[in-house]
Image (cartoon, helix red, strand yellow):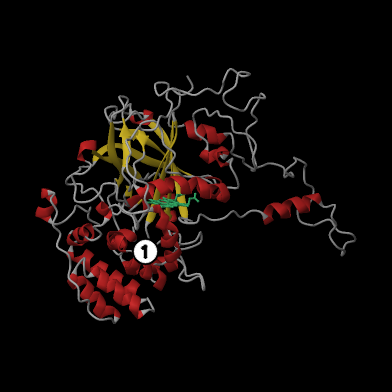
Amino acid sequence: NQRENLDENAKDQQLEQFRVDNDGKKMTTNQGLKVSNDEDSLKAGIRGPTIMEDFHFREKITHFDHERIPERVVHARGFAAHGEFELYESMTDYTRASFLQDPKKKTPVFVRFSTVVGSLGSMDTARDVRGFATKFYTDEGNYDLVGNNIPVFFIQDAIKFPDLIHAVKPEPHNEMPQAASAHDTFWDFVANNQEIAHMIMWHMSDRAIPRSFRMMEGFGVHAFRFVNDKGKSRFVKFHWKPVLGVHSLVWDEAQIIAGKDPDFQRRDLWESIEIGDYPEYELGVQMLEPEDEFKFDFDILDATKLWPEEIVPVKKIGKMTLNRNVDNVFAETEQVAFHPGNVVPGIDFTNDPLLQGRLFSYLDTQLIRLGGPNFSEIPINRPVCPFHNNQRNGFSRQTINVGRVSYHKNSLANNTPSTSTAREGGFVHYEEKVEGRITRARSKSFDNHFSQARLFWNSMSPPEKQHIIDAFSFEVGKVKSKSVRQQVVDMFVRVDKAMATTVADNIGVNRPKGEQINVTLSSPALSQANTIKVPQT
Ligand code: HEM
């Protein structure tokens, strides 16, 4: 059985057949014709014009002319590595996902780290969220955990994502600033979309300037589902915990490094792998029973909220080791296509309205970014298990499907490729009960925007609080509109009055008149401590 023989080297073996090494080889055209001269174009007379007949010149130049593809609409700048994931203990009770069954089983992975806002050539140490996207090449197909290094998100509903990104990216009239949140449209969006409050506290904290990709956490952010082989479902949130711990830069370091070595974080990852000091991350899960769905002071489907680890502990279930650098950044890092919708049996979705929209967006954007519907055939994107379906044609189709039947159902090919039952490994969507009226509205349970923002603030040590005040003062201080600056301090007074007042003084606006909110949470662990556990930097 091909599937049973798959091991952690399966992806390497698959990629091997696509590797091309020019060392010691003769130069040819794309047709295999040996080239006699690669320095002079074919001319009519020694000082005359180049002639159309020069097929070698035309092939070389046209290929060059078409070398660029669009950069990702977000997370354009990234760096990636290969590795393996090893399970600590069987998760059979919780999920039927094959790669989470046998302890010691190793699954090949490919991980791409990224910044969100900056373009392909921007600096690594910008104050920004970091993407942490993992592709598990499992024996049941590719599973993508497309996460970030911050456990919550800016908005609650995917329909606001274009607005968020339009506000965050460089302003359209002058394409400035390149990769920073210190500008008017960013903060205008913040002040007018207050569900962002909790995320902004993380964004102004040291978490947004990690020391290294090796020293930051990763979070799936959304509530997903585990489903076991009996059909029982639990809510789950995914975490990556770096074995080296969480470490950040301070802002002065981040700015100086941005000038001296814009590649600081990719260089750190590359070099640590080259010398065999492999980055490691433990995979953790927070699991919630379905009957506990409504036991919290927040909606567990709201992506602007975390599940406090004191109440829902993180269970560490395995370890990922990144142990091989890419051979070619374009072929692998740039062409890899992650998608939260790439799941395997035993992992399913919830009704988080941000997740639901993501399930549409990634495939859609990759159709244009990677030039049509056949990008899953690009070597880095191919599953390591067999794949068969009735798709055909499209730009740059690689597969040579044999036979004349490419439709289902049929009698001419005995209905092959045939579908699989759940018992045979077929993906069957979790049968969640859904009821209600069709409506374009937000659940009231998504309304509490400041409690966890305040808990986060309360959880910071004095130096971390000072860093947050400094970050607000620097970032909002660069905003030209005084009205926007005022709106921001008037908003964040709800998180902490002293903080917002100090920022107001630092950035030349009136002290805010409002009051910080009282956190009254029914969860005993939280209301006693009034803080949440945030790993120290
Ligand atoms: C990349 C959309 C929220 C993590 C992308 C891309 C799009 C996108 C279009 C570019 C993909 C490509 O060109 O291949 C969205 C939308 C969101 C959303 C519509 C919300 C409605 C999130 C959230 C997270 C996240 C909440 C984290 C949990 C990432 C990561 C990448 C990415 C890590 C980079 C993947 C890579 O390295 O190739 N997103 N995103 N996104 N997104 Fe999102």
Crowdedness near tag 1: few (<14), some (14–19) or many (≥20) residues, C-alpha within 10 Å: many
Kindly tell me whether residue 79 is visible in this rendering.
yes
Can the viewer see residue 147 in this picture?
Answer: no
The location of residue 487, given as percent across then percent down, is 30, 74
Q: Is residue 140 above or below residue 253?
A: above
Q: Residue at x 52, y 27 (%)?
A: 386
Amino acid type at circle 1 is Arg
Which residue is farthest right? 45
Can you give x and y, in whole percent of width and height, for residue 94 in the image?
28, 31
Residue hosting label 1: 127
Quadrant of the image for the C terminus?
bottom left
Residue positioned 63% across, 18% down in the render: 412
In the rendered structure, the answer to whether residue 233 lies left or right of residue 323 reads left
Mark 1 lies on a secondary structure that is loop
Whether residue 284 is situated above or below residue 90 in the rendered picture: below
User: Is residue 312 toward the left or the right of residue 321 in the image?
Assistant: left
